[in-house]
Amino acid sequence: MAVEQLVHYFQQQVYRGTLSHAYLFSGSDYPGKKKLTQAILQALVCQQPTVVNQPCLQCELCERIEKEQFADTMVIRPDGQGVKVDQIRQLKEWLGKTPIEANFKLAVIEKAESMNASAANALLTFLEEPVANVYMILYVNDADTVLPTIRSRTQQIHLNGLQTEQRIVELEARGILPHHARVISYFNNDSIQQWCEHYEANVFEQWHKSLRLFYRKLLQGDTSAFVTVQTHLKAYLSTQQGLDGLDYYLVITNQLLKALQSQQTSVAYLEELIQECQPTVSRLLAMHRILLEAKKRLSANVSAQMCYEYLAIELSAWR
């Protein structure tokens, strides 16, 4: 569903009094998530709604929300590599206080998938016992990286952002080679911006080749995958590169699963992997699970090198 359609949907939810106490906004469209959050706030506080029950966007409160100057909202962002338990405790203390400007409070947790276990469990106590007129919105790229107990207690809304082909065209316009642009298009908006700012075709090509070599070894259960981390990937394993690589692997794994289920694909690289490695659905599902676990570890401050070595150990042993 497009962002504008979602804006209208949430405006109607507010008007009918059926707004949920907790939402999980997934996908790569960070501006879209912010726009939806702003629309919800404006619908809740607008003093001069239109005849079709939409906020006027011109009253004092609507304008201050647009400028992010509304007192009864709080945004939690990762402290370092992740959201910590002390931040969640401070949030819960703030939520327990009386609102200043309105009759509700709304909190946003950005990159909620980066919460460690203690922070996630602390948040669960709020989600399990919702308080009237208190709303929570979690931003994540991939809903599957959040604890199932959190997913089950929130309503999920997925925002895709720019369509892949449109994004590729824009990346090419910024001087990125076409086959590199397709890979970068899989990443989240922050990563895309960083690649655009620091793009070097030769460096990216070497990183991409190393990623593909390692993935093929993982798919085959090759025990030399562990050595490949040292010999080919080590130089390209900053935390950001590590996360981008895992996102790339998740995309390939999902595409392979779809190709096996439909028994057809027009992507040459996928055809090569299927012919050379002969993956099974159960193998790919196991890879998907272990890739997500590696991503959680990396988001919890485990080094990228250790996370990739974990992949090599787990996926070699799986055979």
Image (spheres, helix red, strand yellow):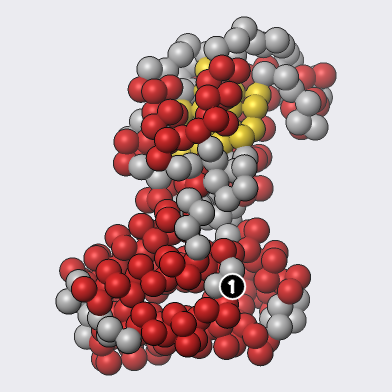
Q: Is residue 89 left or right of residue 99?
A: left
**Residue at (50, 63) in percent of width and height:** 303
State whether residue 67 is above or below residue 146: above
Local secondary structure at mark 1: helix
User: Could you tell me which residue is drawn at 74 percent across and 15 percent down?
Assistant: 48
Q: Can residue 227 be seen in this view?
A: yes
Residue topped by disc 1: 184
Relative to 97, residue 158 above or below: below
Q: In this view, does 141 lie to the left or right of 98?
A: left
Image coordinates for residue 34, horizontal then vertical, percent: 65, 40
Q: Is residue 182 visible?
A: no
Q: Position of residue 181 (x, y in %)?
A: 61, 78
Residue under the point 39% across and 84% down:
227
Residue 297 falls in which quadrant of the image?
bottom left
**Which quadrant of the figure contains the C terminus?**
bottom left
Residue found 56% across the figure and 17% down from its top: 93
Residue 174 in which image quadrant: bottom right
